[in-house]
Amino acid sequence: MFSGFDLGKPAQITFTSDYHELVTGDLKPEVNCHISYDPLRIVPKDGSYVHGDPSKPIFIHVQFKENGSTQSKELYSPNGIISDPHIDVTGRGSMLFQEVFIPSDAEELIIWFSYLNPNTNETLYDSDYDHHFHFRWPYHDAWVRKVDVVDDSLSDRFELEVGTIPSITQVSVNWRVLNSTELLKEVTPLKNVSQTDDGTKIWKLSTVVPKRAILRFKLYYEVNGRQYKNDNASQYFLAPQPQQINVPPPPQAPVQL
């Protein structure tokens, strides 16, 4: 079974200024999720907002199931007010933060943000066009059991096996060949072929790819009519899997007699 890149590591969701939402770490119930947010996503472009100004707060709003109760918290700047913030679209610049504890009975993590524009008294929202941002537990919902690119005469075959929790109704793989210009990107559904005694659904794909293909892929899966993804903490998966490099230990100092 493939071990996820960030399995067991602290959960974080980064909301970047170019409107990407990057999940890293092991997002799941009964953990604290660290929220990192670029205020340039929501504040007016007129320069009236100063990074981290507590008199002009940005709020995060959280639910743990559709139409559930809402928790709201003010985002904060750990370095206080910054008049000349570092701007970085990857989320490594000046950011605002908050912690969200995900309870054991959470069905999903639903997030949106709000900001009261003091110039117009209008509340601005960052809410994925009123749909809100929905996250689930990628490593625990859908995981790679087996993956390989196998020799098949004139071509090769991309062989993928995925396990999921019982409530997942669809699985597809978004993949591309890295070492060929023939195929840019494909999204291919997997077939549910069986279910194990513990309830794990088994999904499989076998499809033709160019000879000696190296593939990068991520998983999409559907729960209750909504699509989520497992992109291996934004690192994606590779097929065939790269061989593990065993680094020799450093030489020991000679023993003084």
Image: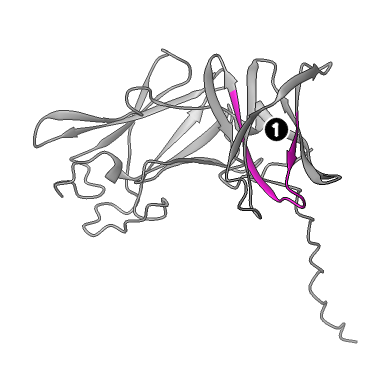
Task: Decide: is 6 above or below 94.
Answer: above
Residue extending farthest left? 119
Tell me which segment is drawn in magenta: 205-221
Q: Image quarter for residue 39?
A: top left
Quadrant for the C terminus in the image = bottom right
Residue 122 position (above or below residue 201):
below
x, y percent for residue 200:
76, 20
- From this viewpoint, is residue 200 visible? no
Query: Is 9 on the left or on the right of 2, as rendered?
Result: left
Residue 218 shown in magenta: yes
Point out residue 8 in the picture as x, y percentages from the top left corner.
Answer: 66, 40
* Structural crowding at the residue carrying mark 1, measured as other residues with C-alpha within 10 Å and reported as few (<14), some (14–19) or many (≥20): many
Magenta span: helix, strand or loop, mainly? Answer: strand
In this view, the residue in front, 236 or 187, is 187
Q: Which residue is nearer to you in this view: 86 or 178? A: 178
Q: Is 97 inside the magenta-drawn segment?
A: no
At mark 1, the secondary structure is strand
Q: How is the image coloured?
A: one colour
At which x and y percent is residue 178?
63, 52
How many numbered marks appear?
A: 1
Extreme right residue here? 257
Q: Which residue is mark 1?
A: 143
Can you give x and y, in whole percent of width and height, for residue 134 in the image?
Answer: 46, 26
Residue at 63 percent across and 20 percent down: it is 170
Q: Amino acid at mark 1?
A: Trp
Q: Compared with residue 19, is residue 228 higher up or lower down, i.e. above or below?
A: above
Q: Is residue 200 left or right of residue 17?
A: right
* Residue drawn at 33 percent across, 39 percent down: 75
Instruction: Judge left or right: residue 20 versus residue 146.
Output: left
159 sits left or right of 217 in the view: right
Can the viewer see residue 213? Answer: yes
